[in-house]
Amino acid sequence: MRPSGRTASQIRPVTITRQFTQHAEGSVLIEFGNTKVICTATVEEGVPRFMKGQGKGWVTAEYSMLPRSTHTRSQREAARGKQGGRTLEIQRLIARALRGAVDLKLLGENTVIIDCDVIQADGGTRTASITGGCVALMDALTWMRSKGLIKANPMKYMIAAISVGIYKGTPIADLEYLEDSAAETDMNVVMADSGQLIEVQGTAEEAPFSFDELQEMMELSKHALRELFDIQRAALN
Amino acid sequence: MRPSGRTASQIRPVTITRQFTQHAEGSVLIEFGNTKVICTATVEEGVPRFMKGQGKGWVTAEYSMLPRSTHTRSQREAARGKQGGRTLEIQRLIARALRGAVDLKLLGENTVIIDCDVIQADGGTRTASITGGCVALMDALTWMRSKGLIKANPMKYMIAAISVGIYKGTPIADLEYLEDSAAETDMNVVMADSGQLIEVQGTAEEAPFSFDELQEMMELSKHALRELFDIQRAALN
Amino acid sequence: MRPSGRTASQIRPVTITRQFTQHAEGSVLIEFGNTKVICTATVEEGVPRFMKGQGKGWVTAEYSMLPRSTHTRSQREAARGKQGGRTLEIQRLIARALRGAVDLKLLGENTVIIDCDVIQADGGTRTASITGGCVALMDALTWMRSKGLIKANPMKYMIAAISVGIYKGTPIADLEYLEDSAAETDMNVVMADSGQLIEVQGTAEEAPFSFDELQEMMELSKHALRELFDIQRAALN
Amino acid sequence: MRPSGRTASQIRPVTITRQFTQHAEGSVLIEFGNTKVICTATVEEGVPRFMKGQGKGWVTAEYSMLPRSTHTRSQREAARGKQGGRTLEIQRLIARALRGAVDLKLLGENTVIIDCDVIQADGGTRTASITGGCVALMDALTWMRSKGLIKANPMKYMIAAISVGIYKGTPIADLEYLEDSAAETDMNVVMADSGQLIEVQGTAEEAPFSFDELQEMMELSKHALRELFDIQRAALN
Amino acid sequence: MRPSGRTASQIRPVTITRQFTQHAEGSVLIEFGNTKVICTATVEEGVPRFMKGQGKGWVTAEYSMLPRSTHTRSQREAARGKQGGRTLEIQRLIARALRGAVDLKLLGENTVIIDCDVIQADGGTRTASITGGCVALMDALTWMRSKGLIKANPMKYMIAAISVGIYKGTPIADLEYLEDSAAETDMNVVMADSGQLIEVQGTAEEAPFSFDELQEMMELSKHALRELFDIQRAALN
Amino acid sequence: MRPSGRTASQIRPVTITRQFTQHAEGSVLIEFGNTKVICTATVEEGVPRFMKGQGKGWVTAEYSMLPRSTHTRSQREAARGKQGGRTLEIQRLIARALRGAVDLKLLGENTVIIDCDVIQADGGTRTASITGGCVALMDALTWMRSKGLIKANPMKYMIAAISVGIYKGTPIADLEYLEDSAAETDMNVVMADSGQLIEVQGTAEEAPFSFDELQEMMELSKHALRELFDIQRAALN
């Protein structure tokens, strides 16, 4: 039923390449099938003004798609002079999820910025960004400890994210573009490796969905997210 | 347990005043306790460029808070020169939800713009905007029929929205500001009056939440949303 | 002769509702007939950079119209990314007039911001903003004294503003939209309750005006402004 | 009493140099003492979108100060990314005044843009811009007739502008910077050479002014403006 | 003498990977040592407004660096709201050079956009962009011919670019970051494979340079550029 | 062969008027034939943030064209809300060249800003800006010494700039607009009066150029620049 021949619960091959670029404290290329995102983590001294003097750190994120990462070229946001609503919505989600995974007190007055730049898009760029960004963040925190900038590991838990949806009446996991653009309902689930939920965003694209369908999609995501945690762990070892 | 003495499932008094201002095709003041939002619906001929020539209409929304609708004044976005990420995220949600409730073919090549301007904020401004905006939209569509601009009612269903959350370990409905700012988890649920779901957005603010808590919050929202549909119906009669 | 049946010198019913919203230090809804403006006064510690270290305070103002406060919807300035020339011109006038009414030394290094948000427009929004803004400013200064932030009342005099014009060859006071859009000449007069002038702005819209007509309009404004000072005083008691 | 030794009603030497630059259809350097403004008039085919199809033309204006036209350098507005409120207020005044002097029907669907660029400022830049801009506009209209673009002269009357004010308690005409920055009241008067008024803008800078002082300033301006009309006429012959 | 041990005229290993991403009509990853740039070529129907109706095409380029492609993170231009001067200068150079290599008449009324996104920077990003962009452009033109959009190959010649400079008193080719930041003089040379020059930009960074040094650097660039043309040819076969 | 009848190496009449406006520390009107640029130098205490605490000064430049300095009017950049790529490219060149001519240590923590405003354009505005800007800079430095702000003259050498190009197959110096717009190749050369080179920028506009042509243009520029240094020296004495 799925264009790729995958089963409903089957996710695409996921690969995580660490130290993808050389300058950043954490640098990951994450691939969910044809979706490819570079996630870098930058450590900076100090915190934004509204956080100053609280003895706590800050974690933030930025998201962007290369203009031709998609089927047709989209206008470069820097040239247009502002980030679009979709971009801001996604980077707020990434930042919120990753920030929640860090004990900001243990981070001290330092900031970690996660840049997620999509070089090729085929559905699920925001969930790939969160899943890969978490690995880049972990690498940056390890770097901080190795430099003596922090004493303990501030990571409370690893997080990962997956998209699920209703496609031709059936709940499926990890939608690729062809599925995403035709799905009745699209949902992104962010989970901690403890099995607790971080963020749930479900949207009726073509048709409203029932409470039961919500339940089914949640189950599907739980399954897929466990696989992603295994892949993260393998990459980190 | 709640600052207001409400029970966990009890929503605030909700009032809907139609024809609140005189120029708009639909104009509603909606109040959820101390949260007050002016929702106006404007009918314009034509559609945005990317929709032209498809024989279909468009529904969009804009959201703003008066600078001093909140405890401390926030900078006016027009003066700052751009809308913030939170504003864009909220107005995308409002627009998506209301657009989904309309049969765009029956609307013809016309646009309805829902402006949601918060004049006083005490939590739940986005859910009040959706709930009030739906009434303003209905009034604008009725006006269109009365003017002969459309032949049939394009409204597929009424929609309403409510916030639910985990506050001091307990799921509660319709969070006011004091609760919202202290909640472990915050969730917005948009539903059609058919009982189907339109949008579900749950965020772990202070602590991750379990699949069971998600279930409980969904139940709570179902109950509250039925009340809101009654209030909408009463206002429209 | 006037669409409303008013006499040439007759102003519309004016009502001033104090404490209209709950968060601001001063909050006024002012209505000149169908023109309705929310004026809030916000007190903030400190002054803009160019005023620092002089031991003096600052008073400023911002003005905006809700997109559908008018007959046809105008684009939201926050979405457009900048405030228009008309908006800036009006808020500079409001700020200048209100700032002149305050002894900035007695204010200490504090700032009062007057936000004037038009929720319904029918001519005279800038004069309503000044007249209502002055009451909100007074309430904020009273609040400051009650909190011990200032010792003496810094208000030098109350101010109010009225529009006058030449309509079908006759000088009239307090133009509503229908008159305003057809007037030969339009003039705004800001006066102190001492009877002295603060600002006079007369513009030939359709036809130049004579020195005698200027004189007649000035007389008409004097009469109307006395009424407005009575209404302000009544509202403040 | 005046820093320059001028009498209260005495204006500075005014010179008008036509054809100051070579490309524009009208190009004037106007000097009021040390205030120097380049006013160019550009003729363009067509009108702005909101004027299309009415068979009428449009006249508009833009105003700017070179960064170091003043005692201390001000930030370049192009670098800052927006025009300031003062700039917009002034260019709206210039445009309104000059547009009113032209019969837009006789102009056909053409636009004339008056650019006023201050190269040296010593008070009165907006009144110099209007007075010089009117000559540049006249030259551009003459050019249009010579090219057969219009048949009749669309100029209804010449206009000129002067600043007057209360300085050390005395009404004076044509304030230079030292006077302007110390004046109790500052007023700009735009008049047609028919002796009728186009625009009157009086502002209490340091102290409110009386109805009688307004009257005196108006008389003073009438006198000064007659001189300016003579200078304009001489320059055009 | 050089940090890398290279000889003065020796360029870094250069690799060109075609079809690096899947959506673009031309997509190249070019590496000059540690400098890595993704160059994609997008074909769009139509031309910018100022080119319409001339029967000719257009070639343009955009350039950007990922925020953490450099040693320290630079602010994302999309977030800052504008492209910096350096970015605009570089993309104007890339566009001008590539546009010159194409016979715009043979291109028909089509546009090719070359996006150069630096994912890792170690000096010479603009010359890598031109050299890789030319291959991506060639691939896009070949695609156009295969689709029947154009009949003949509009490419007049291949172009490539190299940086040369004076480093510790000696002319060297292909500066990496360490050399670039310490060089007395920095120069970029763009050449056609015919051996003719397209663009020469030499800048005295630390010390002025002599006419003889200019001559020496030109010679050095000629040599390096011949190597680059060989690498381009090999990649295209 | 040249429209003006000049020989290939002949530059236009160049005049330098110092103290052109009265407020700036250095103010020069420079004319290359019909190209006229006002160059002012402003001295400000302090340096930009990235230079603080190094005990060194800063020199920067801004460039702008009056909207109607050209044959057809171009949009005012302040109204458009951003400076164009050409403007930024030019002002970066001017700033880089002039900054290189100053010993920043001798300047102390002070900034000199060179504003170059083109009031009439006929080709060569950037080279006129550099040549005139250098005189304005020298005047500002002399003023600083006279005020005791600096002890020694920080000027390392005078600089001047000239355009050269290939026009109808022949190398010529100092291109005016008619030549510039038809030239095969356009080149700008900035030189120190020591005879050393500061910046060389050659661009193939219509056709690539040979190494020999580069050589010829360089020779031509050397000749022309010597004349410009004589004119600068004469102006400064």
Image (tube, coloured by chain):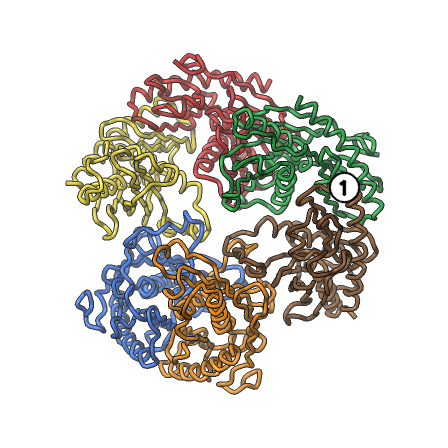
Chain colours: A green, B brown, C orange, D blue, E red, F yellow
Circle 1 crowding by C-alpha within 10 Å: few under 14, some 14–19, many from 20: some
Location of the N terminus of chain F (image quadrant):
top left
Location of the C terminus of chain F (image quadrant):
top left
* Up-down relation of residue E201 to residue C8 (above or below): above
Q: Quadrant of residue D121?
A: bottom left
Q: Position of residue A56 (x, y in %)?
A: 55, 40
Q: Residue at x 29, y 27 (%)?
A: F197
* Up-down relation of residue E78 to residue D158 (above or below): above
Query: Which of A17/E114 is in front?
Result: A17
Name which residue type carries label 1: Ser
Image position of D219 (left or right of B58): left
The residue identified by callout 1 is B210
Residue D144 can be seen, yes or no = yes
Query: Which of E227/D46 is in front?
Result: E227
Q: Position of residue A213 (x, y in %)?
A: 83, 44
Q: Position of residue C6 (x, y in %)?
A: 54, 85
Query: Which of C100/C86 is in front?
Result: C100
Q: Position of residue D189 (x, y in %)?
A: 34, 72
Residue E146 can be seen, yes or no = no
* Up-down relation of residue D48 to residue C36 (above or below): above
Query: Which of F187/D78 is in front?
Result: D78
Image position of F107 (left or right of C92): left
Q: Quadrant of residue E111?
A: top right
